[in-house]
């Protein structure tokens, strides 16, 4: 009992010390955006509901920024128009923190149980590290919806789909109706043969979109015929915050970025993603399928602002999982630990902003696209864990006792995994991270 109490005391002390260190770091590194994006949503909704204007006609005073999401997103956000501004901020922050905690718990809890970590301690450490993560702090400081979308997708892929739940796909469909980019997860379901979930996702997206159209026909007509195609509303493609392949190409020639070069890069990225995502699902590794698709989405989207890179959180947690599972003192564990430390370190550093004003030259090409290179590395090198039987249809994965992680031919062997518990019991390692 005394030993357990001492351990708890050390853990509490460690969490407090880490929280203080993160808070000190944030006072130096975090940029205060004053909930800029939330102000855009709030202003557009107020203009629409209280001033009788059209939501897509609104532009924040002195800027080119307006409401860019589909009408269903406006329906979801509609209660905000009836809240005072401080309450809208509170709801945004609390919602982001809660759904972030849930998603991180879903991904981390199976790792903590297999590694024998105290689960509350593992979550507390992870949340402190997440607070320092630039995409996360940007999401909260801008008042963005990224973590809500990740939560809806993860609900399907980590909880409902592996359990064979007939509602699997609804979360992806609703996320797609709120913002179009999560629609890539419908493609993920299709290429990996989960037809029922894919159809459910498409039906949910269509139902939500049609419901918004029935309630707000003028706004829906404006979005689908005009606002959707007005790229000036989202900002400059060459801006250093755009950490997508389109941003890379645009920064090479800001005046006339090559659409052909971008399309070639996108097709190559999609080919690699399709190959690896199918391999992940064939091995029952749904969490890695989620992580790979999130990285791909960040790469191929025409605009991936830094705050969108919260979609890399699953990949970083899975790197930790694979590092813990690798044999102690092995080169594989050292490589995986180095990978996650370097990736995380760069993703909290704001390093790309050093080239905000001038991204010319070799250093500008390499430095201003740092987060793109990390996304590419995760897409190419994130281990696919082997050991579970392939998912069949929409049913749960089944697997036998534990094995090693393998990769399709041609992927560097950073990836072998052999799981065990402190008691020596072996566990299958490719199963979706859904237990608990």
Image (cartoon, rainbow, N blue to C red):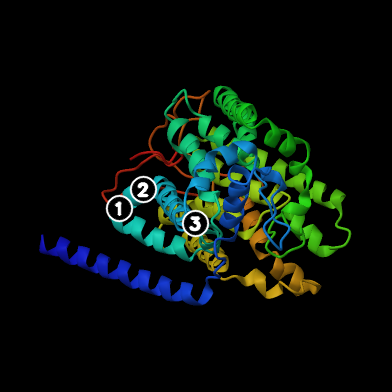
Disc 3 secondary structure class: helix
Separation of residues labelled 3 and 2 (CA atoms): 36 Å
Disc 2 secondary structure class: helix
Separation of residues labelled 1 and 3 (CA atoms): 36 Å
Residue 262: percent from left, percent from top: 81, 51
Quadrant of the frame with the N terminus? bottom left
Q: Are marks 2 and 1 in contact (CB under 8 Å)?
A: yes
Residue linked to disc 2? 109
Residue 231: percent from left, percent from top: 77, 50
Residue 285 in view of the camera: no
The residue at the point 79 percent across, 63 percent down is 251
User: 179 or 249, which lies in front?
Assistant: 179
The residue at the point 82 percent across, 64 percent down is 252
Decide: few, some or many residues near mark 2? Use Cα within 10 Å; few <14, some 14-19, many ≥20. Answer: many
Residue lying farthest to the right in this orientation: 256
Residue linked to disc 3? 85
Decide: few, some or many residues near mark 3? Use Cα within 10 Å; few <14, some 14-19, many ≥20. Answer: some
**Quick check: 256 left or right of 234?**
right
Tag nearer the camera, 1 or 3? 3
Disc assigned to residue 119:
1
Number of numbered discs present?
Answer: 3
Residue lying farthest to the front in this orientation: 51
Disc assigned to residue 108:
none
N-term-proximal mark, 3 vs 2: 3
Residue 360 in view of the camera: yes
Separation of residues labelled 2 and 1 (CA atoms): 7 Å
Decide: few, some or many residues near mark 1? Use Cα within 10 Å; few <14, some 14-19, many ≥20. Answer: some
């Amino acid at each position: 009992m005394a030993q357990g109490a001492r351990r708890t005391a050390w853990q509490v002390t460690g969490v407090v010390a880490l929280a203080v260190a993160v808070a000190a770091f944030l006072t130096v590194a975090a940029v205060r955006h004053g909930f800029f994006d939330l102000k855009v949503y709030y202003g557009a909704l107020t203009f629409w509901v209280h001033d009788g204007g059209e939501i897509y006609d609104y532009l924040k005073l002195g800027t080119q920024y307006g409401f860019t999401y589909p009408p269903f997103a406006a329906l979801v956000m509609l209660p905000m128009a009836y809240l005072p501004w401080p309450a809208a901020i509170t709801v945004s922050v609390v919602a982001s923190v809660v759904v972030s905690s849930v998603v991180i718990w879903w991904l981390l809890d199976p790792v903590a149980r297999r590694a024998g970590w105290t689960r509350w301690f593992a979550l507390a450490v992870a949340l402190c590290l997440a607070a320092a993560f630039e995409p996360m702090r940007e999401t909260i400081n801008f008042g963005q919806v990224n973590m809500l979308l990740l939560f809806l997708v993860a609900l399907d892929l980590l909880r409902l789909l592996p359990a064979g739940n007939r509602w699997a796909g609804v979360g992806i469909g609703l996320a797609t109706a709120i913002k179009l980019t999560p629609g890539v997860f419908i493609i993920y379901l299709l290429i990996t043969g989960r037809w029922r979930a894919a159809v459910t996702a498409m039906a949910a997206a269509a139902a939500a979109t049609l419901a918004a159209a029935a309630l707000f026909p003028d706004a829906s007509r404006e979005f689908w015929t005009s606002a959707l195609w007005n790229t000036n509303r989202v900002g400059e493609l060459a801006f250093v915050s755009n950490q997508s392949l389109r941003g890379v190409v645009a920064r090479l020639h800001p005046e006339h970025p090559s659409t052909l070069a971008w399309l070639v890069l996108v097709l190559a990225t999609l080919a690699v993603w399709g190959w690896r995502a199918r391999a992940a699902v064939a091995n029952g590794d749904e969490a890695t399928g989620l992580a790979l698709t999130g990285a791909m989405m960040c790469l191929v989207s025409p605009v991936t602002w830094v705050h969108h890179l919260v979609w890399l959180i699953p990949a970083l947690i899975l790197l930790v999982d694979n590092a813990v599972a690798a044999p102690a003192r092995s080169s594989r564990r050292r490589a995986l630990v180095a990978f996650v430390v370097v990736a995380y370190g760069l993703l909290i550093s704001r390093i790309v902003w050093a080239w905000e004003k001038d991204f010319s030259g070799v250093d500008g090409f390499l430095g201003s696209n740092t987060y793109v290179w990390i996304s590419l590395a995760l897409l190419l090198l994130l281990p696919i864990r082997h050991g579970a039987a392939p998912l069949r249809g929409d049913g749960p994965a089944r697997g036998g006792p534990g094995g090693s992680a393998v990769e399709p031919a041609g992927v560097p062997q950073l990836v072998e995994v052999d799981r065990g518990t402190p008691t020596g019991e072996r566990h299958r390692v490719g199963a979706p991270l859904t237990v608990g």
